[in-house]
Image: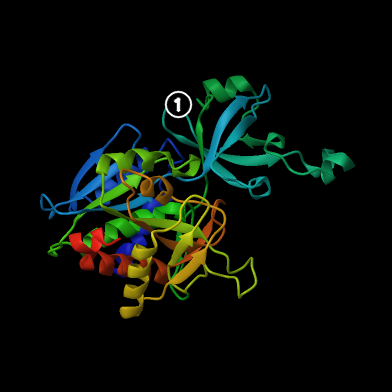
Amino acid sequence: MDKLRTIERIRKISDANGISGFEDEVLSVIREEGKDLGNFAEDRIRNLYLYRKENIEGQPVVQLNAHTDEVGFMVKAIRPDGMLEFITIGGWIPTNIPAHRVRVKNQEGVYIPGLVASKPPHFMTEAEKKAPLEIANLVIDIGAVSAEEVINDYRVGIAAPVVPEATYSYDEKHDILLGKAFDCRIGCVSILSTLEELEGEKLKVNLVGDFSSQEEVGTRGSIVSANTIKADIAIVFEGCPADDTVVPAYQAQTCLKKGPMLRHIDSRMITNPRFQRFALDLAKEYNIPVQEAVRSAGSTNGAPIHLSNDSIPCIVIGVPVRYAHTHYGISAYSDVENGIKLAIEIIKKLDESIIRGF
């Protein structure tokens, strides 16, 4: 796998703007990156499908899923003083939001720089200082001094999508990635790289890359994509919240530089144990480091996919992401690479009889 190419691909897709429901820019980048790998199709919820050019009619179908959307915000109201009230899109903790830069998309498609602001401490009462922070106490300041200026000059209106302001970087010495939307743009890269590495290979299965929308607001896009593709089996790539800095070492199951995480269970899916065992055994056979996890919370696109049709066997290959659902995430390139390696070995081994055994 071409490391420099993959690192640059992560930059392009991570830096693209695309909160849930507004993923168009991300799709444009993916189309460019995958233009030589097969044929694209797009549906009306903005799911993007990439059908491998070597697919042969009649073979079992493997769905390779990742979601294109990122968490963000949306303008709810414009105050007379020019401040923008907003709601969250996706799961945010209020204390992670203030004093960060954002990009507000105006009616002409231009992203306006802004800052998430709160009442300065100089003007807060003691009770306000001690009160829990709420989204209603925050605004986005784009530098305007009136609602009229926001609307007529900045051309920002109600329902404008707002993206976290963050720029991707790669620390070559420590092999560390830093940027926004690794949940799940790293997964989108993993699909493209998997298809690229398998280019020209003779397989016993057909591959469909599924870049689905609106995962962060209820796995909505994958409900549609699962029913469109009607796969026989699925691999979901995800950027999973790393736990190596927040729990005791003996409990940590999603650590940086220890390989992708394969979850056995989360709040909405019990992973198909036969497919999971198949993947774990292959990881061991090919010396690919992986982590196993038992999760009582969270979910992925695996939830709707594994309940589709007559139940699609599904596993999740999750790359650890520190500080997911904030402006910046931290991931290790080696974890991305090993997730792709595992997916490749799984796909090479799959055939109709093995899939039926799951």
> Residue 11: horizontal and vertical position, in percent?
39, 56
Which quadrant of the structure image shows residue 86? top right
Instruction: Residue 249 in the image: state x and y as whole percent.
Output: 61, 75
Amino acid, disc 1: Gln
Residue corresponding to mark 1: 107
Q: Nearer the viewer, residue 126 or 46?
A: 46
Residue 234 is situated, as x and y percent measured from the top left of the image, at 31, 54
Q: Is residue 39 left or right of residue 180?
A: left
Is residue 353 visible in the rendered structure shown here? yes
Which element type, helix, strand or loop, lies under badge 1?
A: loop
Q: Residue at x 45, y 39 (%)?
A: 20
The answer to whether residue 351 is visible is no
Residue 272 falls in image quadrant: bottom left
Of 113 and 84, the residue lying toward us = 84
In this orientation, which residue lies closer to the viewer: 175 or 266? 266
Residue 265 percent across, percent down from the top left: 49, 59
Is residue 133 placed above or below 253 in the rendered structure?
A: above
Tell me if 12 is positioned left or right of 197 in this view.
Answer: right
Quadrant in the picture for the N terminus: bottom left
Pointer 1 local density, CA inside 10 Å: few below 14, some 14–19, many at least 20? some
Q: Residue at x 59, y 28 (%)?
A: 76
Which one is nearer the viewer's eye here, 111 or 87? 87
Check the image and report above or below for 61 versus 25. Answer: below
